[in-house]
Image (cartoon, rainbow, N blue to C red):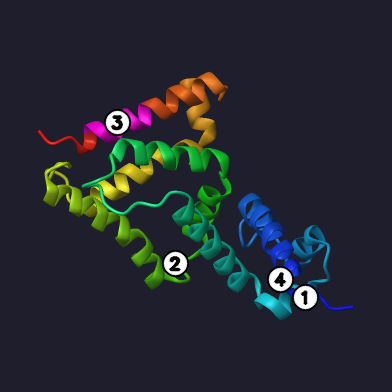
């Protein structure tokens, strides 16, 4: 019987997303990840090395998923508020990514794993904003890189600190999520509006 290497790796990464999002890379163990995945821990070490390497792999995969799910080419053509709404939707459905990013910020001093390729990931969005600025559809009063960061923050902060969102805006019912999303879209439009 052939070993399902891809399936095993997928199960390990899925388990790692949950464990790392819940406890961070320093708060969980390879043993817990392996148990959650239903494999022995030697498999985890064989496929991914240690926890830091597995954490980097998981975060890279999660960032690739959001890039595929919420693509953007140019804000000369796409409306930035609609994009912000789609980013909000993604984070609402997959809050683990925000948790992983928060853990990364807490655990790593200085450069993070895959930082250079991640700069490209985020840089692509800043280029899309700059194209909107060149086209006259987005304000030039905020630099493209800052505007990119602000838009991503508007859309993602709701799941980064859900307890604060709940305390300020109430329980996250479907009605409240619709209200939050509408606010994100409108705030992004106002931020980017050409005066």
Q: Earlier in the sequence, mark 1 or mark 4?
A: 4
* Front residue of this view, candidates 54 and 71: 71
Q: Residue at x 36, y 26 (%)?
A: 183
Q: CA distance from mark 3 to mark 2?
A: 32 Å
Mark in front: 4 vs 2: 4
How many discs mark residues in the rendered view?
4
Mark 2 and mark 4 in contact (Cβ < 8 Å)? Answer: no
**Quick check: can you spot residue 111?**
no
Mark in front: 4 vs 3: 4
In this figure, which residue is indicated by the disc labeled 2?
Answer: 109
Q: Secondary structure at mark 2?
A: loop
Q: Which residues are magenta?
A: 183-190
Q: Quadrant of residue 7?
A: bottom right
Per the image, is 187 magenta?
yes
Q: CA distance from mark 1 to mark 3?
A: 47 Å
Q: Quadrant of residue 112?
A: bottom left
Mark 3 and mark 1 in contact (Cβ < 8 Å)? Answer: no
Q: Earlier in the sequence, mark 2 or mark 1?
A: 1
Q: Residues within 10 Å of mark 1 (few under 14, many from 20)?
A: some
In this figure, which residue is indicated by the disc labeled 4?
Answer: 6
* Front residue of this view, candidates 8 and 170: 8
Q: Residues within 10 Å of mark 2 (few under 14, many from 20)?
A: few
In this figure, which residue is indicated by the disc labeled 1?
Answer: 43
* Front residue of this view, candidates 110 and 162: 162
Q: Secondary structure at mark 3?
A: helix
Q: Is residue 85 left or right of residue 26?
A: left
Number of the label disc, if any, that sits on residue 187: 3
Q: CA distance from mark 2 to mark 1?
A: 29 Å
State which quarter of the image contains the C terminus: top left
| Residue 1 percent coordinates (x, y) | 90, 78
């Amino acid at each position: 019987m052939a070993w399902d290497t891809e399936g095993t790796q997928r199960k390990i990464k899925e388990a790692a997303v949950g464990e790392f999002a819940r406890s961070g890379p320093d708060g969980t163990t390879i043993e817990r990840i392996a148990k959650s995945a239903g494999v022995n821990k030697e498999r985890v070490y064989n496929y991914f090395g240690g926890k830091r390497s597995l954490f980097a792999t998981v975060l890279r995969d999660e960032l690739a998923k959001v890039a595929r799910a919420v693509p953007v080419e140019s804000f000369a053509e796409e409306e930035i508020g609609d994009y912000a709404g789609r980013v909000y939707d993604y984070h609402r459905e997959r809050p683990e990514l925000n948790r992983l990013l928060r853990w990364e910020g807490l655990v790593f001093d200085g450069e993070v794993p895959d930082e250079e390729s991640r700069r490209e990931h985020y840089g692509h969005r800043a280029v899309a904003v700059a194209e909107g600025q060149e086209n006259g559809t987005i304000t030039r009063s905020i630099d493209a890189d800052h505007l990119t960061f602000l838009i991503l923050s508007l859309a993602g902060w709701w799941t980064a600190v859900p307890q604060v969102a709940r305390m300020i805006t109430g329980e996250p019912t479907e009605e409240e999520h619709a209200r939050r999303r509408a606010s994100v879209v409108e705030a992004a439009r106002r931020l980017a509006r050409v005066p």
